[in-house]
């Protein structure tokens, strides 16, 4: 196994994947992440944090959109559909935040082990969900226009 | 901040934390306002408490640690806390939608 990047700070020997950075990782949580590999380049680790935080903010945007939709639905016709989409958006936003946590742990483990980063599992779901919600809302708007 | 870490990424990361905490507070306040407007008081109260907690953490919590150079690279336990807070705000938003659906069906 290779240590990660030119700025790697670990003192462990290559080839030992279990807690090989001099025991400093033993006190750090989560143990499932910090008990393996060597200390990666700190900039990569911080970038991984920022990526997770960006995913959480995306989840928050979904929640805000869902609540906005609920507010609009309270004054609109056909509001059950809008409320249903709002519920899905809010639950999806919450799930995205939890997925960001799992993704951060998986990426940090990969960085410590010098392995390729795992693919972003949430991204296809987010794109697919946004497309489906957009189509449903557009279809709803067209139906409302035709009825008038 | 130690020179080994560099001045850029830790500051950028601290600002990212602050943005996220303030976003939790803002969305919590939005959920609270929407809930109170729609007359779902319990959702409004809980979401309002989350918004206040988000502001308190953003002002007095992690960003100050980062400024004083005590920031650990490991984001535990702040990352799970903020993820769970987001999930709870999402559940409150979903509860608000569910209440509206039940009202419309009733």
Image (spheres, coloured by chain):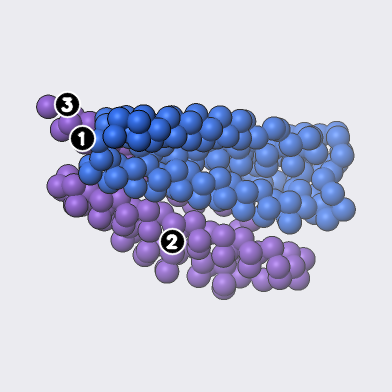
Chain colours: A blue, B purple
Mark 1 closeness class: few <14, some 14–19, many ≥20 residues within 10 Å: some
Q: CA distance from mark 1 to mark 3?
A: 10 Å
Which of the 4 image quarters holds residue B24?
bottom left
**Residue A32 x %, y %:** 61, 35
Mark 3 closeness class: few <14, some 14–19, many ≥20 residues within 10 Å: few
Q: Chain letter of disc 1?
A: B
Identify which residue is drawn at 42% across, 68% down: B60
Of circles 1 and 2, the one toward us is: 1
Mark on residue B25? none
Of circles 1 and 3, the one toward us is: 3
Q: Chain letter of disc 3?
A: B
Which residue in the protein does label 1 denote? B99
Which residue in the protein does label 2 denote? B22
Mark on residue B105? 3
- Tell me the element at label 2: helix
Residue A133, compared with residue B87, is above or below; it is above
**Residue A103 x %, y %:** 60, 37
Label 1 and label 2 in one chain:
yes
- Tell me the element at label 1: helix
Residue B21, compared with residue A17, is above or below; it is below
Considering every residue shown, the one lying at the far bottom of the view is: B68
Identify which residue is drawn at 57% across, 50% down: A54
Of circles 3 and 2, the one toward us is: 3
């Amino acid at each position: 196994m290779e240590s990660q990047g030119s700025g790697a700070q670990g003192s462990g020997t290559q080839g030992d994947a279990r807690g090989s950075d001099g025991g400093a990782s033993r006190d750090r949580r989560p143990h499932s992440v910090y008990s393996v590999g060597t200390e990666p380049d700190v900039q990569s680790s911080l970038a991984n944090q920022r990526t997770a935080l960006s995913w959480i903010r995306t989840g928050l945007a979904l929640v805000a959109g869902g609540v906005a939709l609920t507010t609009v639905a309270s004054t609109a016709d056909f509001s059950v559909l809008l409320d249903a989409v709002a519920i899905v958006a809010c639950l999806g936003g919450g799930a995205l935040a939890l997925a960001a946590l799992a993704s951060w742990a998986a990426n940090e483990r990969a960085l410590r082990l010098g392995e390729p980063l795992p693919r972003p599992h949430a991204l296809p779901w987010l794109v697919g969900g946004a497309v489906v919600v957009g189509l449903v809302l557009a279809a709803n708007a067209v139906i409302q226009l035709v009825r008038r | 901040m130690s020179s080994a870490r560099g001045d850029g990424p830790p500051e950028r990361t601290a600002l990212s934390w602050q943005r996220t905490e303030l976003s939790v507070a803002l969305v919590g306040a939005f959920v609270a306002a929407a809930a109170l407007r729609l007359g779902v008081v319990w959702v409004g109260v809980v979401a309002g408490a989350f918004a206040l907690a988000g502001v308190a953490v953003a002002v007095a919590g992690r960003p100050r640690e980062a400024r004083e150079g005590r920031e650990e690279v490991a984001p535990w336990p702040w990352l799970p806390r903020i993820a769970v807070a987001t999930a709870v705000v999402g559940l409150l938003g979903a509860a608000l939608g569910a209440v509206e659906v039940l009202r419309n069906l009733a």
